[in-house]
Amino acid sequence: MGLKSFVEVSADSHFPLENLPYGVFRSKAAGGSNPSPGVAIGDFVLNLTVIASAGLFDGPLLKNSQCFNQPSLNVFLEMGRPAWKEARATIQRILSDNEPILRDNISLRNKSLLPMNEVEMLLPVVIGDYTDFFCSMYHTKNCGTIFRGPENPIMPNWFHLPVAYHGRASSVVISGTNITRPRGQGHPTGSSLPYFGPTKKLDFELEMAAIVGPGNQLGKNINVNEAYDHIFGLVLMNDWSARDIQAWEYVPLGPFLGKSFGTTISPWIVTLEALEPFACDPPKQDPHPLPYLAEKKHINYDIPLEVWIKPAGQEQATVITRSNFKHLYWTITQQLAHHTINGCNLRSGDLLGTGTISGPDRDSLGCLLELTWNGQNQLSLNGSARSFLEDGDEIIITGRCEGKDYKIGFGKCTGKILPAIPEDQ
Amino acid sequence: MGLKSFVEVSADSHFPLENLPYGVFRSKAAGGSNPSPGVAIGDFVLNLTVIASAGLFDGPLLKNSQCFNQPSLNVFLEMGRPAWKEARATIQRILSDNEPILRDNISLRNKSLLPMNEVEMLLPVVIGDYTDFFCSMYHTKNCGTIFRGPENPIMPNWFHLPVAYHGRASSVVISGTNITRPRGQGHPTGSSLPYFGPTKKLDFELEMAAIVGPGNQLGKNINVNEAYDHIFGLVLMNDWSARDIQAWEYVPLGPFLGKSFGTTISPWIVTLEALEPFACDPPKQDPHPLPYLAEKKHINYDIPLEVWIKPAGQEQATVITRSNFKHLYWTITQQLAHHTINGCNLRSGDLLGTGTISGPDRDSLGCLLELTWNGQNQLSLNGSARSFLEDGDEIIITGRCEGKDYKIGFGKCTGKILPAIPEDQ
């Protein structure tokens, strides 16, 4: 049996006492409130500012810290794993059903435990830089085949290093934010001018992302065997993509406007501590990685992921993909070590996307580009069909590890498509 | 004759009363001081925090503003052109030789005017995102020829849109910061493993960058004819590059670790107002740009640029390139309009690099990749020779518009190469 909290946690909840993911919220009540760090428990949010003010963080690292008296988690993340472990132990204890300190203090319970439907979730961190990797071999192979043909779909560098590019930090938004269909240039046909207008190939990308804890100094790298201590946890991510814009613009400098109109992350950061029971072997790496990428503890996590689509006007969402985090060829610690090998400095709160997480099967592909093979095969949904996303479509990503007596869930990462802005603006 | 200040300004100064570029500095004196916004005049820095506290910003927009009581210029930049014009008019007036308010107030002069050699310059803005364009046709053609051969050196998209990629914001550093030679993977030869070690092809890139003023909301674009009002000014930039790392990693997602180990900017932001007298025609655009990139006021600026190299142990620097900002095919306003056409949000302080500014001639090429044709033709310097940069080399970029009676200068953008960190770290 799992751990038991005095807060009611249903059997299928994403947020039992074993999880305790971190986010930043504010009250929806009239006048609202300042953003505060919080932890999810069942259908409630525990306000960490209130808990800290009440003196319940009594361990040596957090006792006198202002880390929970902040509008973001960056200060707490910068403190590193010893502080994270201390916080987790304290929160797990004060929420457990045999500890009276919060359970029996009605006034403090009312102040610190807020129903989730009464709060608005915000971006949990200030994201200095957002990097997106390209670490699913299946996704890489499918994209290469679609864009360049079946001869050499995977570039020779791919098996030697975790390929990545810098994404746009300003347009990372929190789950629930609407996404406006972007306009841009698409490939010209023949000798005509390029197409200009709303994208005709709007896509989602099923990803997860690591949130960086302590950073590194410019000019110094982080050893792959120490990389684990620089990662706080994971979120779900949807890296919205406009395939026609991307295909025309990306040579030779990579994706730009085809991606930078929006990237959605889920609000709750699930810590690596909570994911430990779900560690598993990654795919075999062949060739063997260069020494700076060869790690002693080489693990992935078994995190089943789903993508659902809910067209405008439909009551029900339809599942269109079932994939898993464990398909990633390069681990998040290898990604982080590679990112810093040139001396590039990471900062706490940086976002490291995994790239689209496609699995080996037809129903485990992580984007419509792959699912419809660039629009060639329509996807049938509950009475309608899709090549790419239409206005009003909502995409819902979920992820949940299945423990014996409990689940470790990520909640949802959602976004709905709004029509493009008119031509003359 | 130029304008005259009571502060002595030598005839060849970069910083006469017509310039008034903005930066952020702190005192080098024992204990230092908090970072403050300042303006350069001759060999002095005018402390804007002190001037604001003394009540000398008496115009309607700045009178009650805290914009100069900040550790960065972001708040001032967000206020937009009306505030910038008001600040410029006030500063030009209080520094002029016929205005007694500062000239005759010895105590305020001593507090507000600091010799440049007694201050340390800092990054002038908090850079949310850094984007690098690719807007010199000469550079594009040369790189394409070197990397892919002479058949189709310029990709078909290049004449239709200002190609760009997202760079790394965390590793943008201020002029004078040393750059550690990055390590990384280079192309394998034959069937061997890729090379790993310190880059053998370390390069500079002569660039300039626009600093964004007011940003835009996610999902809305900035019209090309309004883009001017979203650009505060320009700095010099050196986008350090490791060509062997770049060449191996950049397919298909663009440059990453070959660039992210350091990007240097000059400390003084020269405003577009100061550059107005140097407006000139850009190169003719053929084909005619799509309507969203066709601008009514289509201008470049005539800014002569130089790159100097000073090897370790040499007394004298040697000039290796003379180029000009006016060679850019796409204007900075077109760059900004394109950047937002998909709804991508810019924020005040964002950095938009132009890409390497090469001219048409052999001695106007903006990087060693071009100057030595990827190391094939060594560059001879005052007794030594270079294919790429060596440890101890210092690169000095300068830029200065030549007015009839005055110069509008950018000062210097410098950086020195330190040896790579040892193998076992």
Image (tube, coloured by chain):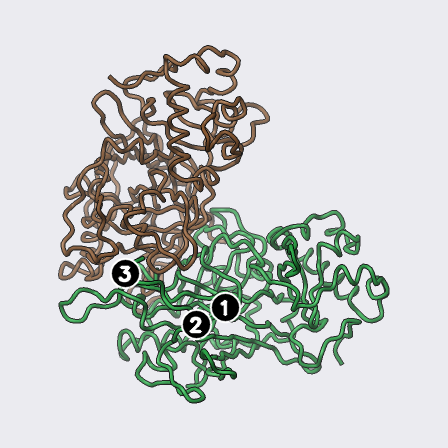
Chain colours: A brown, B green
Pointers 3 and 1 in contact (CB under 8 A)?
A: no
Q: Is mark 1 on a helix, strand or loop?
A: strand
Which residue is painted at 75% across and 53% down in the image? B52
Residue A139 position within the rendered picture, expressed as x and y whole percent measured from the top left: 21, 49
Q: Which amino acid does label 3 sit on?
A: Pro
> Which chain does tag 3 point to?
B
Q: Where is residue A41 in the image (x, y as percent from the top left)?
A: 38, 22
Alpha-carbon span between mark 2 and mark 3: 22 Å
Q: Which residue is at a point 45% across and 80% down the rendered structure image?
A: B359
State whether residue B280 is above or below residue A306.
Answer: below
Three-letter amino acid code of the residue under disc 1 = Met
Residues at marks 2 and 3 touching, judged by CB atoms closer than 8 Å: no
N-term-proximal mark, 2 vs 3: 2
Q: Nearer the viewer, mark 2 or mark 3?
A: 2
Based on the displayed image, in which of its 4 quarters is residue A397 positioned? top left
- The label on residue A287 is none
In the figure, A82 relative to B158: above or below?
above
Q: Name the residue under label 3.
A: B252
Q: Mark 2 lies on which chain?
A: B
Residue denoted by label 1: B237
Residue visible at 30% across and 29% down in the picture: A409
